[in-house]
Image: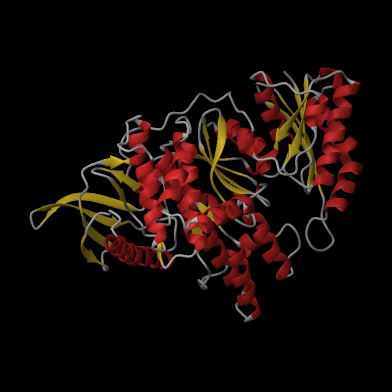
Amino acid sequence: MQVLGIEGTSHTFGAGVVNDLEIVSNSKSIISPKSGGIHPKEAALHHFEVADLVIRESLEKAALRMSDIDLVAFSQGPGLGPCLRVAATAARSIAISNSKPVVGVNHCLGHIEIGRRLGKVTDPLVLYVSGGNTQIIAHSNGRYRVFGETQDIGIGNMLDKLARFAGIPFPGGPVIEEKAQEGNKLLDLPYSVKGMDTSFSGILTAAMQHLRNGERLEDVCFSVQEYSFSMLVEVLERALVHLGKDEILLTGGVAMNGRLRKMVELMGRETAVKVASTPAEYCMDNGSMIGQAGMMMFNSGIRQSISETSISQNFRVDEVDAPWISSWEPSSEAMVGSESKLERMEYFGRKAIRKLRLPKAYRIPILDRSIRNSRLRNECSVLARLEVIGVRTPQLLDVDVQSFSAITREIEGKTLRDFLIGNEKLQGGIDVLGSVIGKMHANSVSHGDLTTSNLMVADGIYLIDPSMGRIGADPEDMAADLVTLEESMHSAHGRIPGLWEDFLRSYSGAFPEGGIILETFMKIKKRRRYV
């Protein structure tokens, strides 16, 4: 089957031919704006002018005629509306005039599927990083699910805006990578991780201020990469541990960055999972990736009429059926913490757990020590506060700041994650969980990483590892807890009906004044990409 893929979401118009055996051709034309970022109308005009040339070039490289093509696929969204319309019009015109079937492809899906093919991975946890997107994605229950993402701008956009401010022409990412290699001073920037989500606008603002204050561009670039990439790898590792996947795929335009690739590879080595990176030529937007995803869709029985191929600027990957990957079942084996080593011990005759916060090879030492120290101190403070307000946690017995370790009383139970995976009946239902979290939030305390892996079931519900939590939390902090918990339930336990709805009912019952938290929860979801 010969598939012509057409890409046109932003700065690139691309066309590529793929089949079951090989990627036959891959042609593209990228707009280079004279100043500023990508202007939608200018990019669309560029696409209109080069579309015929790029498509013909791709067919010539493949030594094929249009009559040899069996399927036309195009980027349906997300992206810039004027650009999407050019690609869609070209694809529909070719399909109609040559009596060929046509399918609209989610742009993100294209990045994943070309990465899966070329990286030789089957069912990976995906770190998708590009100009407009920063997402952690895993396939579950017939679709790719977004487990965490940026709450504001994509990391690629952040790098490009920093570059423009520094007088670096588009695209700025490669130059920032070069400058970072000459930097050696770690400047203070916000480490913005909330649950499984990230934020880059604060890093951008702080980095620009450092430049105004006279800091070297090389040190600013170095610091921006170390902070932002450490954030990404941290949440990627926590998702890996929670979901139990054994493969990682790095894809998208920013995935070409050598420092990011090295950091992900170091994390993969520590966790003994396979790490695959999409080859550089196919990290950037291209037609071949659209053809690959379109072929997967068509071969799995997905068909579209012309009326179903209208563009969608806000097209999310979790809206797309992806039945070609076998249903994934998370492992019910006990998971090891992503940041800590746990050791059973006796502490003055009591069963206890010693938790040692591990150094991370992917972080530079000065940043690593700072994060481990702050997380340890914060966990101890939040545990003490939760005990005071009557929320069950492992009792804190001892702390050693020098070794980044703490000793807590052992809870003889299992994580809520393993409980739900085993389809065991939680006494009192999920209502128990809603009451516990409602009580915590009613006392203005957040957890910071509220996945089902950080909840224990014993003689009730216990909260563990609140190292990213906050005492005196604001609605944003508490709403971030709910965002993380919802992602966790949908990603790992999506086959259990009504989980989230049952939780919300009991949460509202335990915290009647929590309406502002639920309103903020919805605002956070709307701030996320393409919602």
Task: Say left or right for 468 vs 189.
Answer: left
Say which of 467 and 289 sits in front.
467
Task: Say left or right for 526 vs 58.
Answer: left
Question: Residue 344, image x and y in percent?
Answer: 18, 49
Question: Residue 9, image x and y in percent?
Answer: 76, 43
Q: Residue at x 49, y 44 (%)?
A: 486
Furthest-bottom residue in this view: 213
Render colour scheme:
secondary structure
Say which of 360 and 374 sits in front.
374
Q: Is residue 247 visible?
A: no
Q: Residue at x 81, y 32 (%)?
A: 58
Say which of 171 and 330 sits in front.
330
Question: Residue 419, image x and y in percent?
Answer: 33, 35
Task: Say left or right for 116 vs 93.
Answer: left
Question: Residue 374, image x and y in percent?
Answer: 37, 67
Say which of 274 and 37 sits in front.
37
For the N terminus, the quadrant is: top right
Q: In which quadrant of the rendered view does residue 395 lie?
A: bottom left
Q: In which quadrant of the rendered view does residue 383 lie?
A: bottom left
Q: Is residue 416 above or below residue 194?
A: above
Q: Is residue 98 above or below residue 56?
A: above
Q: Is residue 64 visible?
A: yes
Q: Residue at x 63, y 20 (%)?
A: 300
Total count of labels: 0
